[in-house]
Image (tube, helix red, strand yellow):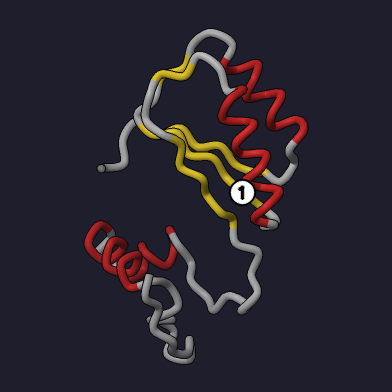
Amino acid sequence: AEVARSSCADGTCAGVWPRDLEAFLAAHVPSALQRAAIAPRSRLPDKAPWLRTLALPRRQYFSFRREARVLDRVVRQDGGKAYGLLFRASTFAGEFCESLGAFLAREPRVASVAVVGGLGP
């Protein structure tokens, strides 16, 4: 995503976030005051510890064992400090909860799990 650099001296902090995110917020929250309350913006340090989100395939999950083996390798090789998991339009059954819990217990770098009904294509 393209980010334009500018200062926050004028109070708007334009260009601090990617342009597509700024456009999304402007379209859905037209009031600048409401946008500031919902998503306060300030210049982030150049080396901010970004959370890397790993979007998993949309499907019915009965277990998380196979995915856990793959994600173990990804997290080890990538070397990032914090990760999140994103499940979109998925269903869960069987031993999914137990195997996901075991994965989260042994992988402290996965700091966030999001389950979303739908996020577009």
Q: 41 or 107: which is nearer to us?
A: 107
Residue that appears at 40% across and 19% down:
60
Q: Is residue 42 above or below residue 88?
A: below
Q: Which residue is mark 1?
A: 83
Say above or below: 94 vs 31. Answer: above
Q: Residue at 55%, 17% (x, y): give it.
A: 63
- Quadrant for the C terminus in the image: top left
The x, y position of residue 108, in whole percent, is 75, 41
Q: Position of residue 70 (x, y in %)?
A: 60, 36
Give SS at disc 1.
Answer: strand
| Picture quadrant of residue 119 | top left
How many numbered discs?
1
Q: Is residue 53 above or below residue 72?
A: below
Return the x and y of residue 118 as percentages of the image width and height.
Answer: 31, 35
Three-letter amino acid code at disc 1? Tyr
Residue farthest to the top, as pictured: 94
Residue pictured at 35% horizontal, 29% vertical: 89
- Which one is nearer the viewer's eye here, 80 or 101? 80
Q: Residue at x 62, y 46 (%)?
A: 74
**Number of residues whose C-alpha sits closer than 10 Å to that of mark 1, classed few (under 14), some (14–19) or many (20 or more):** some
Q: Quadrant of the N terminus?
A: bottom left
Instruction: Report the front residue among 111 and 64.
Output: 64
Residue 39 image offset from top left, x and y in percent: 45, 62
Image position of 41 with respect to 121: above or below: below
User: With 47 as the anchor, is 118 left or right in this view?
Assistant: left
Q: Which image quadrant for residue 101?
A: top right
Q: Nearer the viewer, residue 45 or 98?
A: 98
Relative to 59, 100 lies left or right: right
